[in-house]
Image (cartoon, rainbow, N blue to C red):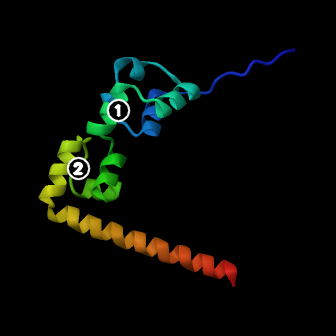
Amino acid sequence: MTSQKTSQTMKPATAAKKLNVYLEATPAEFQEGVVSRDELNALQTDPPEWLKELRRNGPHPRQVVAARLGVSIGGLARGGITDPLTTEQIEALKAEAPDWLEQERATQAEVRKENARAKQKATEDRES
């Protein structure tokens, strides 16, 4: 009896999330098929032009928009940003610097500082 290794596949939405791209902006053939682990690895190591373009100019999914603005996904929602944004829109928002963005950035900085403090404390507790 010989067993053949089958390649693990994923839905296009999962692959898009792993590639940090907005699914609806990907080509139809990507959206309609399934993506194998090998295909995903190939897309990550040698991205085709459509993927390079999406990563460069968007539209970007919420997690990418949040990261580029330096806020949380919840912070985006509180700021009224619920749709994907292009790189140009993100840059315009940064330049405009609305009050909600400054507030969310400050909140995110506090969260990072608190997380770092908690991590440091946990390390010290383990060492003692």
Query: Dots 2 and 1: beta carbons under 8 Å?
Result: no
Residue type highlighted by circle 2? Ile
At horizontal 26% and vertical 37% (from top left) the residue drawn is 57
Q: Give the numbered dot on residue 117.
A: none
Disc 2/disc 1 C-alpha distance (Å):
24 Å
Q: Which residue is mark 2?
A: 81
Q: Is residue 43 left or right of residue 24?
A: right
In the rendered view, would you say 79 is above or below 4?
below
The residue drawn where x is 30% and y is 29% is: 25
Nearest to the observer: residue 112 or residue 24? 112
Q: Is the N terminus in the top left, top right, bottom left or bottom right quadrant?
A: top right
Please say whether residue 12 is visible from this viewpoint: yes
Question: Circle 1 is placed at which residue position?
Answer: 52
The answer to whether 14 appears left or right of 28 in the picture is right
The three-letter code of the residue at mark 1 reads: Lys
Instruction: Please state the horizontal and vertical placement of residue 61, each as a whole percent of the image.
Output: 33, 41
